[in-house]
Image (tube, rainbow, N blue to C red):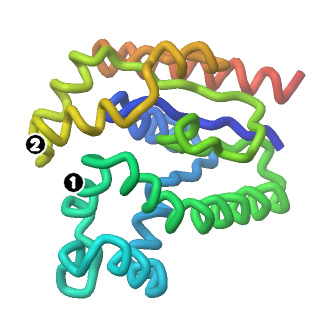
Amino acid sequence: MMVVVITGGIASGKSSVVQILAELGAAVIDADKVVHGLLERGRRVKERVAEAFGKGVLRGGKIDRKALGEIVFSSKEKRILLEKVLHPQVKRIIARKIRRLEKSGIPLVFVEVPLYFEVNWPSNPDEVWVIYASPDAQKARLKGTHISDRDIDNRLKAQLPWEIKLARATLVIDNSGPPDALKDQVLRAYGALLKKLDG
């Protein structure tokens, strides 16, 4: 089975790429969805997060991801603490999903891991696609969300510089422009992968 990691920066368009691939019929695993599932349904995870960050991150018995995000992106130490709580379980769940797909005969899977380089993901994928967007494009997209300007700056600073990510990429997809340009790049890249599999 071929495993392709999709990563990039905040608001760079990773989810848009994953959506295009899913529409093309590709198998996709989204690490963020795994995290959200753990925060919503994982009782032990919720308990450990509340223990680490205080009851203020709970709303109606659920983790308030906005409140949690404001805390962890304001401090490297707190971000590392959250990673220690979440990432071992996230990695196990994703590895299990990949094994299931492989057993079912799926030849190719895309795994979206937003912090692939930052957290030293232990796997050795066949390819790493970095979805790039200029810092101006990132900020413009984030302005349309609930995230404050200070939080935007904190989140951008928390990620590795683009030059490091781009240097480690198997493929760079530039999403600084219009949606049609993104789709064209994804279609070409996906087509090239399918040719590799057939070859």
Mark 1 residue element: helix
Q: Tell me: 2 left or right of 82.
A: right
- With 18 as the anchor, is 75 left or right in this view? left
- Residue 81 picture location, percent across and down: 45, 61
Which residue position is annotated with label 1? 70
Left-right relation of 40 to 118: left
Estimate how packed mark 1 is, as few (under 14), some (14 to 19) or many (20 or more) residues with alpha carbons within 10 Å. some
Residue 56 picture quarter: bottom left
Residue at (43, 21) in percent of width and height: 161
Given residues 158 and 98, the one toward you in this image is: 158
At 19% from the left and 26% from the top, the residue drawn is 139
Q: Position of residue 165 (x, y in %)?
A: 53, 22
Tell me the quarter of the image containing the C terminus. top right
Circles 2 and 1 in contact, beta carbons < 8 Å: yes
Q: Is residue 53 above or below residue 46?
A: above
- The residue type indicated by label 2 comes to Ser
Q: Position of residue 4 (x, y in %)?
A: 68, 36
Distance of label 2 from label 1 (alpha carbons): 9 Å
Task: Please name the residue shown 24% across and 37% down the image.
Answer: 154
- What kind of element bears circle 2? loop
Give the residue number, with chain letter if any, for mark 2.
148
Q: Residue 16, relative to residue 49: is it above or below?
A: above
Question: Who's the residue at 31% across and 48% down the image?
Answer: 75
- What residue type is disc 1 on? Glu
Does residue 4 appear left or right of residue 118 in this picture? right
Q: Is residue 11 above or below residue 171?
A: below
Where in the figure is residue 136, as x and y percent of width and height?
21, 16
Viewer-proximal residue among 94 and 61: 61
In the displayed orientation, state which residue is furthest to the front: 77
